[in-house]
Image: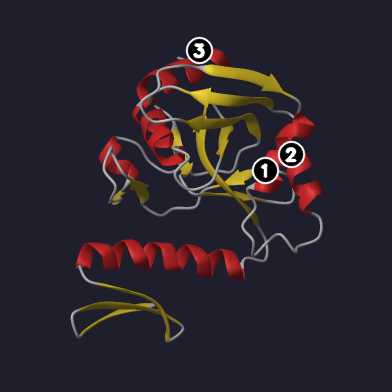
C-alpha cells in the first residue's frame, strides 16, 4: 500500500491499484486504514472475520457485533478506558477453535462528530490484548442517538450465531464452515441483544450485567 500526493489531494493505492482519492492528509490516513481493512480481510486464510468490536475482560472476550454507525467503536473505547484490553473496534478475528485474536490497528472514533479520527488504545490508557481468548459474552446493541434507555434482553446462542453471520464481511460470506466457526465462538458465551443508551451508561450496564467492575 502507498499514499501518493498529486493534483489537489492524495491517492491511496493497494497493489498499485487506486483505492481512494481524498483532499486532506487526515482523510488520506483514514482511507489508508479502511483500504488496508478490506485488503486484509480479502486475503485472510487462517482466521475468519466478523464486523464486531471486541475487548478482553478478565481473560474472556466480549464481542459487540454490528454494522458501521452502530456505535461499536465508541463502546469499545469506553470499555478499554475502564480497564479492558482491546482486540479491535472493527473486525473480530476468529480462529478455528473459536478464540478471538487482536487486530492491531487504530480505533476509528467519531466522538460525537461526523468525521472519524484515528486513536490508538495507548491514548486511552489501554493496550491491545496480547493473547487470544474464548468468548464469554456477545452483546448486539443498537445505539439510537438522543435516546436514553437500556432495553437489552438475553438471547440464545443460536440467535447470536445468526447475528454473527449477518455481520460477516461479504468477502467471507462464501467461505464454507462459517456456521461452525461462529458456533464455536458462541458455545460458552452469554448472549444479549437490544438497544443501548449513551456510551458511558452503556459501559456501566455492560460491566454490571457481566458481573465485573
Of the residues under marks 2 and 3, which one precedes in the sequence? 2
Which residue corresponds to the image point at 22% horizontal and 71% vertical from the top-left? Answer: 23
Give me the C-alpha separation between circle 3 and circle 1. 24 Å
Question: What is the crowding at mark 1: few (fewer than 14 residues within 10 Å), some, or many (at least 20)?
Answer: many
Q: Secondary structure at mark 3?
A: helix
- On screen, residue 73 versus residue 191, left or right, reads left
- On screen, residue 199 versus residue 207, left or right, reads left
Q: Are marks 2 and 1 in contact (CB under 8 Å)?
A: yes
- Could you say where residue 108 lies in the image, as x and y percent from the top left? 36, 49
Which residue corresponds to the image point at 71% horizontal and 59% vertical from the top-left? Answer: 173
On residue 164, the disc is 1
Determine whether 120 is above or below 137 in the image.
below
- Could you say where residue 163 lies in the image, as x and y percent from the top left? 68, 39
> In the picture, residue 84 is in which quadrant?
top left
Question: What is the crowding at mark 2: few (fewer than 14 residues within 10 Å), some, or many (at least 20)?
Answer: many
- Could you say where residue 190 lies in the image, as x and y percent from the top left? 68, 23
Q: Mark 2 sits on what residue?
A: 161
Q: Mark 3 sits on what residue?
A: 208
Amino acid at each position: 500500500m502507498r499514499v501518493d500526493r498529486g493534483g489537489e489531494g492524495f491517492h491511496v493505492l493497494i497493489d498499485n491499484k487506486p483505492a481512494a482519492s481524498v483532499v486532506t492528509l487526515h482523510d488520506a490516513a483514514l482511507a489508508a486504514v479502511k483500504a488496508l481493512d478490506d485488503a486484509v480481510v480479502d486475503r485472510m486464510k487462517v482466521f475468519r472475520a466478523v464486523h464486531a468490536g471486541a475487548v478482553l475482560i478478565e481473560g474472556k472476550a466480549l464481542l459487540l457485533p454490528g454494522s458501521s454507525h452502530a456505535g461499536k467503536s465508541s463502546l469499545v473505547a469506553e470499555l478499554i478506558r475502564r480497564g479492558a484490553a482491546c482486540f479491535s473496534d472493527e473486525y473480530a478475528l476468529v480462529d478455528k477453535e473459536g478464540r478471538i485474536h487482536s487486530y492491531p490497528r487504530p480505533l476509528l472514533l467519531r466522538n460525537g462528530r461526523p468525521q472519524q479520527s484515528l486513536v490508538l488504545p495507548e491514548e486511552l490508557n489501554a493496550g491491545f490484548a496480547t493473547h487470544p481468548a474464548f468468548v464469554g459474552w456477545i452483546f448486539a446493541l443498537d445505539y439510537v442517538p438522543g435516546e436514553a434507555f437500556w432495553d437489552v434482553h438475553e438471547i440464545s446462542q443460536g440467535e447470536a450465531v445468526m447475528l454473527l453471520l449477518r455481520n460477516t464481511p461479504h468477502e467471507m460470506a462464501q467461505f464454507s464452515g462459517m456456521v461452525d466457526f461462529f458456533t464455536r465462538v458462541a458455545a460458552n458465551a452469554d448472549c444479549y441483544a437490544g438497544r443501548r443508551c449513551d456510551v458511558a451508561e452503556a459501559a456501566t450496564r455492560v460491566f454490571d450485567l457481566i458481573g465485573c467492575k
